[in-house]
Amino acid sequence: MLESAEIVQRFLAAKRQVHPEVVAWIREQSDPGLVDRILREAPEDAVVISSAMIPSIRPERDGVRFLADPHLEVIVGAPGSSDVISSIQDYVHYFRDRYTRLGGLVRSRVHSMPIEALVRTSRYRQQECTIIGMVVDGRTTSKGHRLVQLEDPTGVIQVLFNKNRPDFDQAERLVPDEVVGVRGKLADDGSLFYGEQVLRPDVPVGNAPFLSKEAGRAVLISDVHVGSDTFLPEAWDRFADWLGENDEIGYLLIAGDLVDGIGIYPGQEKELTISNIDEQYAEFGRMLRDLPSRLRIVVAPGNHDVVRGAEPQPALPERFAAHLPTNCTIVENPCLVSLQGVRVLMYHGRSIDDLIPLLPGTTYSRPGELMEEMLKRRHLAPSYGRRTPIAAARTDRLLIDPVPEVLHTGHVHIMGFCQYRGVIGINAGTWQSQTAFQKQMNINPTPARAVSLDLQTLAVEAFDFS
Ligand SMILES: [Fe+2]
Ligand SMILES: [Fe+2]
């Protein structure tokens, strides 16, 4: 068994500190590889390793040991954890938190310089260096180069990316409010920075996902849209039967748009079979009650649900959650849940609407690519002030930190996957056939799909119940 001092020393050698609760837990485990695994899996920018970062340690809450289900734990996004926006100051804190944490991920890999220090003297001209900033905006010049304004807490600078440089495609993919490092050189007159390479916060190259030691299987779905005249009840019944036949499935995760809602878009009332919001959730609750009771069901809201639209979205209020069976765990959007230690980041995915017009070559028909773009930016909704309303609080809850094993999204109603540096992205589609709006927009949904995830291998399998 490792001694406490030895455990602390090993963390210090890796330039980390460790909470005494974690030290005590490691001593109990008598697992020689454990310290190395924790160091590998802990958030890169975490100075102190706390029990909250280790899925298998249940955190202390209010001094009382929290009696959670050992197999299902809500790490981030339990009901009531989204902050109330109180003042304009929160926006300052929000962006500072975003810059500090995402910038910290880049800073851990490269030596960087504050913008003000770089431009103040002539010392650094023609010398290669890295700056880290938030993208203010960007445009393409008349010659086809890309000019981007980058801001850090000390100053703002124009960064020019030459269209003939190898990293130009990355520069074209810079979106407003994302945090990046840029390697390059300051112009002779100090007025401009010539960008050569974009350094995103990104998932570490050696990222090794956690695998459950026990057998287990989860099923991921989203966008049920109960109450809509395009909801597919027969397909849902086939899905329910299938869940009944497959005993090894222990978890069902639902990533938002549980019901169709009321007044979400003009003329919606003509497309509803249930026009009362309470009755929509009551029907959704009946459908979940008909599923096998062994399932642990995680229910997150989306933009059609009854909670505020600004993200993070709170969990369903009691009035509606009361309709759901007791094997449901209601959570916020986004949230991070651990299934036998496998961490799934659930995010409804509204920011995909913002990212598609900003990122050349992306489309609704391949949502996997957008999940990859989120992972590279370590952020679920990088651009602020577009279609995705964000509730700016003191901390940026839309950061992707820690790196999860799985990113589960929805919203676009089209099935898609990605596999990026050990992280699996899953968008399962919907339970609604093509709506009049989607027909107009030429969007072809993939309805009646569910995706199964093996918690021991992270193998993914798609099922079609249409
Ligand atoms: Fe939806
Ligand atoms: Fe949605």
Image: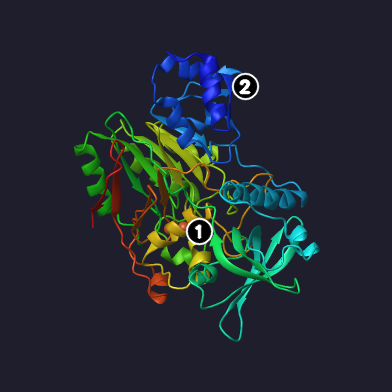
Q: Which mark is residue 433?
A: none
The C terminus is located in which quarter? Answer: bottom left
Residue at figure coordinates x 74%, y 73% from the top left: 191
Compare residues 145 and 278 and report the one nearer the observer.
Answer: 145
Residue 179 visible to an observer of this rendering = no
Q: Secondary structure at mark 2?
A: loop
Q: Is residue 285 above or below residue 412?
A: above
Residue 35 visible to an observer of this rendering = yes
Residue lying farthest to the bottom in this orientation? 142
Q: Position of residue 330 (x, y in %)?
A: 48, 38
Q: Amino acid at mark 2?
A: Asp
Q: Amino acid at mark 1?
A: Arg
The N terminus is located in which quarter? Answer: top left
Residue 80 sits in which quadrant? top right
Q: Secondary structure at mark 1?
A: loop
Q: Is residue 289 above or below residue 165?
A: above
Classed neighbour count for the residue bearing mark 2: other residues with Cα under 10 Å, few (<14), some (14–19), many (≥20): few
Tag 2 residue: 62
Q: Position of residue 98 (x, y in %)?
A: 64, 50
Cα separation between marks 1 and 2 = 34 Å
Q: Position of residue 296 (x, y in %)?
A: 36, 34
Mark 1 within 8 Å of ligand 2, using the beta carbon: yes
Would residue 102 be found to the left or right of residue 261 on screen? right
Compare residues 381 and 278 and report the one nearer the observer.
Answer: 381
Compare residues 308 and 279 and report the one nearer the observer.
Answer: 308
Question: What scheme was used to colour the molecule?
Answer: rainbow
Tag 1 residue: 350
Would residue 152 be found to the left or right of residue 67 on screen? right
